[in-house]
Image (cartoon, rainbow, N blue to C red):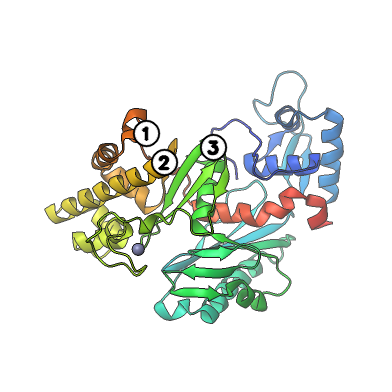
Amino acid sequence: MPKEGSRLTEQPEVAPRTAAARILTLLHDSGPLSRTSATATLGLARSAVGTALAELDALGLVRTTAHTIAGSGRGRPSPLITPAPTGPFVVACALRPESLRVTTGTIGAPIAPPRHRALGARDVAPERLAAVVAEQVEHAVRQQAGTGRACAGVAVAIPGALRQDDGFVHSSLCYDWADVPFGTLLAAHLPGLPLHFDRDSNLTAKAEYRRGAAAGAANALVLTCDGKGIGGAVLNAGALFTGGGHAVEAGHLMVDSRGEPCPCGSRGCLERYADGVALARAAATSTAEKALCAKSPRAQRARRHAAGILGSGLAGLATVLDPDRIVLTEFLADLLAAEPDVLTREFHRASLLARTRGLRPVPGELAEPLLTGAVDHAFTPLLRDPHQIVG
Ligand SMILES: [Zn+2]
């Protein structure tokens, strides 16, 4: 999954050990690259790269061809390192408050166009949702039949606080779950497939850090919103600050102590005014997308109000977290694009830190940040140790 227009860099968070792991990770992040640039980027000896490429070839992960790529350097042509056409794939599932999206990914390639399935109120009962997710995963695996590719793992992004090891969900407000062993329920449907779990906003933030608008930030605050509810994550030099699992529940930041009641038990939470559902309700449109572009005075007022509240909510978060970059993704990026002046003005009005530093929220850069992050998450064990997983 190349990051467009970027120079080659090695990602610190995967912490690969062997030369083979480092080359495979670089290939995954940059897409096909010349042997010369891999050697230079990783600072490895030519002989070490040659040995590692032979190992990766033997594992069926990488091909080295005689072709060269344009601009690969002066002098002698350099062989091109590409992902093996029969290398492994992973399945990524994004569970959102009202939908499930599923895709597949392979090493060093963009993710496949996702499949979308709406989730009704009955679908989100834990046993039922495990069956729905399993059905979609099985479909994705069947689609790869005949390609010669093997499934290396499945990653499931969940909107809630959970235990990564086994997908035990401590709480998910949008599904009304408390202490649900979702990972165990899903594993019963999918024996033999390695399953990986993470909170949705963590995966989005990591993807934007690895390949998008948060890249290189010392302290990045990333906010997500699929339309309903607002999530958040903070990355300190690429490492997540998780607290006890609930850190940066940005949607439940109180912005009005006498405001509307929230299912979390509090009042006046940010997402009651600034998510897509709130905007559509205030604009009297059937969807958030319509509210973002409607020309009626009511819709314009609703947009400015939502953007202003988001700006003051960001100011509260910035005062506590002191980020050097704030990335708004999905619906929140659209709201920023619709009302950039109102949002930034309220943000600066309410935050001395933001004002003095000239900090402005920026939109995410990835079309599918959550699924991209989930694909990376499913590939992490393979990228850390190609021998152990494939061998
Ligand atoms: Zn709340």
Query: Is there a contact, CB below 8 Å, between mark 1 and mark 3?
Result: no
Label 3 packing within 10 angstroms: few (<14), some (14-19), many (20+): few
The residue at which mark 2 appears reads as: 326
Q: Are marks 1 and 2 in contact (CB under 8 Å)?
A: yes
N-term-proximal mark, 2 vs 3: 3
Q: Quote the CA–CA distance across marks 1 and 2.
A: 8 Å
Q: Nearer the viewer, mark 1 or mark 3?
A: 1
On the picture, is 227 further left or further right than 197?
A: left
Q: Amino acid at mark 2?
A: Ile
Give residue 35's position: percent from left, percent from top: 75, 32
| Residue in view at x 33 percent, y 43 percent | 315
State the separation of the CA atoms marked 1 and 3: 25 Å
Front-most of residues 132 and 229: 229
The amino acid type, in three-letter code, at marker 1 is Leu
Left or right, 211 with reference to 223? right
Looking at this rendering, what residue extends furthest in the left direction? 297
Going from N to C along the chain, the mark reached first, 1 or 3, is: 3
Foreground residue among 368 and 148 = 368
Kindly indicate the quadrant of the structure image that contains residue 135: bottom right
Res 60 seen here = no
Q: Classify residue 282 as left or right of residue 360.
A: left
